[in-house]
Image (cartoon, grey):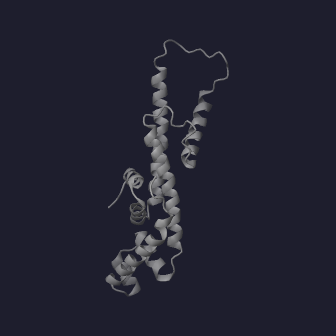
């Protein structure tokens, strides 16, 4: 089953440590890309909401604006705002006022925190996966990267499909036991 970035972030944000482990395990091959897609989408959503709300606020002004100070540079302001929003999302800094003038600042704040947690927990998962040795690593890696099916892995290693499934189940439980203590209980 293919999961969208929105579904992944929503499930991740509401899930407990075990459910988040399962989400990483089941979507390991595309997990970082889905997080990146959601982050870019969130950035654009925040930027669009701020621009729209700013225009809506300014549409109440009547007449022509006259610049008198020669100090206003709207292009530079927009560029700085874009950089500040992007950096705030990357640093998980929601206190700097970047969510001001957005439609749903609390949801955006939760999404930013969720993205940060997803990246940290994926890093933990990845390091434990890479610490596996020999057959455990090779079989699990090929399976969760969706390189080969269980049947193909068994065929490649001259083992039955049941043996490979048992090895995958055993390794998954081992990873789960070692990784979950490093996951936060909730956002």
Residue at 42 percent across and 64 percent down: it is 21
- Residue shown at 55% from the left, 35% from the top: 97
Single out the residue that lies furthest toward the bottom.
158
Instruction: Give residue 182's position: percent from left, percent from top.
Output: 51, 64
Specify whether 117 is left or right of 76.
left
User: Vertical placement of 120 versus 85: above or below?
Assistant: below
Viewer-proximal residue, 182 or 108? 182
Q: Residue at x 43, y 77 (%)?
A: 171
Query: At which x and y percent is residue 79?
Result: 59, 36
Tell how many labels. 0
Q: Quadrant of residue 106?
A: top left
Which of the 4 image quarters holds residue 143? Answer: bottom left
Q: Quadrant of the N terminus?
A: bottom left
Q: Is residue 93 above or below residue 61?
A: below
Give x and y (percent) for residue 2. 34, 59
Q: Choose top left, top right, bottom left or bottom right for residue 151.
A: bottom left
Q: Which x, y percent locates residue 63? A: 50, 12
Which residue sits at x=48%, y=52%? 115
Relative to 14, 32 lies left or right: right
Answer above or below: position of 123 versus 148. above
- Seen in the picture, residue 58 relative to 87 is either above or below; the reply is above
| Furthest residue in direction right, as rendered | 70
Give the residue furthest to the top: 63
In this rendered view, identify the residue nearer to me: 105 or 7: 105
Q: Nearer the viewer, residue 94 or 70?
A: 94
Front one among 112 and 15:
15
């Amino acid at each position: 089953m293919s999961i969208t970035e929105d579904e992944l972030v929503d499930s991740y944000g509401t899930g407990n440590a075990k459910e988040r482990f399962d989400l990483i395990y089941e979507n390991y091959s595309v997990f970082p890309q889905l997080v990146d897609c959601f982050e870019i989408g969130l950035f654009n959503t925040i930027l669009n909401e701020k621009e729209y709300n700013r225009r809506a606020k300014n549409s109440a002004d009547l007449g022509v604006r006259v610049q008198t100070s020669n100090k206003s540079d709207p292009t530079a302001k927009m560029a700085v705002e874009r950089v500040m929003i992007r950096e705030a999302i990357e640093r998980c800094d929601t206190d700097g006022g970047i969510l001001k003038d957005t439609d749903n600042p609390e949801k955006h704040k939760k999404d930013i925190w969720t993205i940060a947690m997803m990246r940290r927990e994926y890093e933990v998962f990845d390091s434990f996966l890479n610490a596996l040795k020999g057959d455990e690593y090779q079989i699990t890696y090929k399976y969760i990267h969706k390189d080969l099916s269980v049947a193909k892995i068994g065929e490649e290693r001259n083992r039955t499909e049941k043996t490979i499934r048992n090895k995958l189940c055993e390794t998954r439980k081992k990873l789960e036991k070692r990784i979950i203590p490093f996951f936060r209980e909730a956002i």
